[in-house]
Structures are given as structure tokens and as C-alpha cells.
Image: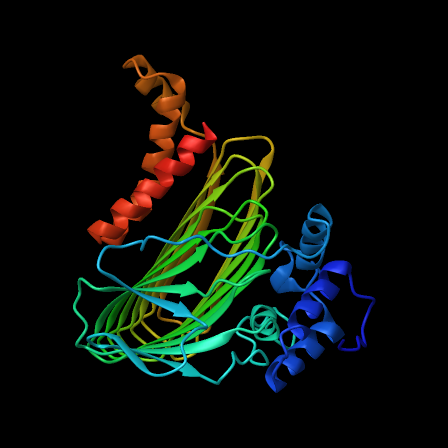
Amino acid sequence: MAEARGPVRTKAELALIGRGEALAPTEAQRSALQVLADEGLPSRRVEAWHYTDLRLLLGRQSEAHGGAAPKGEQNYLTPFLPNSVVVELGRVLAENDVAPGVSVRHSAQSAPYDQVVNHLDRSFDTVRTLNVALGASTSRIEISAGIGPETAVELRPAPAGGGSHAASDVVVQGGARATLVERAPAGAFGDVSSSVHRLEIGDGSEVLWVILQEKGADETHLGQLNVTLGADSRLKLFVFNGGGAVVRQEVHAETVGEGADIQIRGVNLLQDGQHIDVTTTLNHNVAHTTSTEIFRNVVFGGHGVFQGMIRVAKGAQKTDARLACNTLLLSDDGDFSAKPELEIFADDVQCGHGATAGEINADHLFYLMSRGIPEAPARALLIKAFLDEVVEDLEHEAAVEALEARIDEWLGRTR
């Protein structure tokens, strides 16, 4: 086992290191395992993880599950969208054209965990370090302008005992239109999983990327999406968190060409026993770029976190960037922490941020009940309307229908 040179490691930290060492690690894995052994998991003393004390949370999960998670495999998954091309990450061995305009091949390159995308983290990137240490195998996916707009590419982790760990480099060539769905499905009891994806959007391209996280109520998932946008490119990103015990989803986007546009929408659904953290950084590095980020949260219990940073570099004039986090608190047993931030180093920009939290509007509820709708269905209708407002911004009929079905199913379980 890698020798720790820092504080004494918890049982959860030692279990993670043991899992990595049991995989006959490569040199990159051994290096990442040593970092994990030396530095451990982040606590609230690390600013980027202030609201998500991973060392404490994983320790509680480990105690609740009696140590290492039993082995298991994911259930067969129906594609989220029709006409989907499924890519099972981690099992790509040779170059393969999975559809016209879509090629997949294995890449020996690991996620660069020594490059920090969130400057509030430590001298290494926590999510990437765990992803590499636990054996993620990278797949490189190239999408050309030849792909049809009706075809979606669905990225799934390969099933694995103790948790799946996926990584991909996705390159969307200039002028292409692409729809991608990133799945984080339920695994085995007590699994710890991770995913690190890099998305490069070429000049003039448009991408819809949907993150669908539906882990089991006793699982941990750490995800990270890193995006660069070329000139006149467009990203529509939707984040759906509908499961998991401990979840951290990071999104880091960077504009490298003028005219780039980032549209992020998200829904976080929380019940008792859950901790869900969404942390984003939108970096506007060149002039004439735009971004809009809106998250809607429904809290019946547990603890939710949103950390959203907009950074506007010096010289990135005419930037128009806004973010909002809106929360419905529907139980005294739940809470939500929101931290929207702006860092602006240009003087000709339009930027704004905000966060709200409250209960269901009593007047709206009374109106529905006065029309003969019982209280429970009336509350569900108001919650659904609150969430559907951001779902419908996708302007993708199949994706909207599928997400609304997920929301209906979740609300049906919480009534």
C-alpha cells in the first residue's frame, strides 16, 4: 500500500486506496494513489469543498455500509433518447466508427489531475485524482459534421464491482451538431463512482450535453465536465441530479473564441439522507461571449449545495453572463447552501447573479385547491411547473419529454 506522509487516513480513505492498488495500477495510477495517500480526501478546510466535507461524508458512508462495498453490476439500461448510439466507456480497445460521423478509440492518456481547474482546490484536482487512482480508462470520441441531428451519443460507464470510473475526451469538429447524454446509473450497494469528461467544441459547432445522475440512495458519485468553446460555438448543458447519497458534479467551461455561448440548466431533487453539490466555473477569456446558468432545486430533505463562479478575464469586453439558483424548501429537515460569485476584470460587461429560497406560494396553492384539486396533487403541479420552466429551455422535444417523465416519477415517490 502507498505510504501516507500526511495525517492518519480514515477507513474510507484506506478503502479507496486499497481498491486502486488491487487493480494492478499503471504508473499514472500509482502516482495518483500516492497523492491520495499523502493528502487524503478534502475536508471543509479546503475552500472548494467547504460545503462538501468529502472526508467526513465518505467516512459516514463507509461506516453505514460496514466497509468495502460488495461487488455488483449495473442493470441493463434503455437509452435515454431514441436513436441513440451507445458508447460503453472503459471497454473501447480499438478504433471503431460507431455511427456515421462518430469514431471512438481508446486513449492511453489519463486525466491531468495536477492541473487545477478550480483555483480554490488544492495543488491537485480532487475529482481527477480519484478518477485516475481508481483506474478510469479514457475513450476518445470524435464527432464530425457528418452526424445527423437526430442521432444522440450516449456515454455509459462500464459496469464494475465496487464502483465504475469513466473518462472521455470528446472532440466536436467545426460546424458539427451533436447531442450527447452522460449516464451515471445506479450501481451496487455502497459503490463509489467517478467520471471525468473533456469536451472540445469546434468553431461554429452546437452541442447539447445532458448529465443524467440517478445513483442509488446509498452510492457516492463524483463527476466533472470540462469544456472549451471555439468561435461562434454553442453549448446547451442540462444537469439532472435525481439520486445518490453523496454527489458532487463539477462543470468547468472556458471560452476560447469570440461569439461563444454557454447555456446551462439544471435540476437537483433531494430527499432525506442525500448530499448533492453542484460546483461550476464559467471562464470568459475572450470578448463578445455570453452565458446563462439557471438551477432549480426541490428539497424534501438532505443537504444541497450550489457554487457558481463567473470569471471575466481582462480584455473579455462585451461579455454578457448571468446565473441564478432558485430553491423550493419543502421540509424543515432539508437545507440548501448557495454561493453565486463574480470575478470581473473587464470594464465593459453585463453580469449578474442571484439566489432565492422559499416555500410553495400559498396563493397559488389555494387557487388550485379552490378549483377542486386536492392538496397533494396541487403541490405536485406547482413543483412540476417550477422545474419544467428550465427543462423546456432545452428546446429538444425528446429530451424534454424524457426529463419530465423522470421528474414525474420522482415526485410520485415523494408524495
Q: Quadrant of residue 373?
A: top left
Q: Quadrant of residue 346?
A: bottom left
Q: Which is nearer the eye, 133 or 341?
A: 133
Q: Where is residue 48 in the image (x, y as percent from the top left)?
A: 61, 63
Res. 26 in view: yes
Residue at position x 39%, y 26% from top? 379
Q: Where is residue 298 in the image (x, y as percent from the top left)?
A: 46, 39
Residue at position x 31%, y 55% from top? 79
Q: In this view, does 142 lie to the left or right of 39?
A: left
Q: Where is residue 172 in the image (x, y as percent from the top left)?
A: 28, 76
Residue 113 versus residue 16 in the image, above or below: below
Residue 385 versus residue 64 in the image, above or below: above
Colouring of the image: rainbow
Residue 155 versus residue 68 in the image, above or below: below
Res. 341 in view: no
Q: Is residue 356 left or right of residue 13?
A: left
Which quadrant is the N terminus positioned in? Answer: bottom right
Which quadrant is the C terminus positioned in? Answer: top left
Q: Which is nearer the eye, 298 or 361?
A: 298
Residue at position x 21%, y 59% from top? 83
Residue at position x 48%, y 69% from top? 166
Q: Is residue 358 left or right of residue 151?
A: right
Q: In which quarter of the image is residue 321?
A: bottom left
Residue 246 versus residue 273 in the image, above or below: below
Number of marks present in the image shown: 0
Q: Which is nearer the eye, 183 or 207?
A: 183
Q: Which is nearer the eye, 2 or 113?
A: 2
Q: Position of residue 232 (x, y in %)?
A: 24, 75
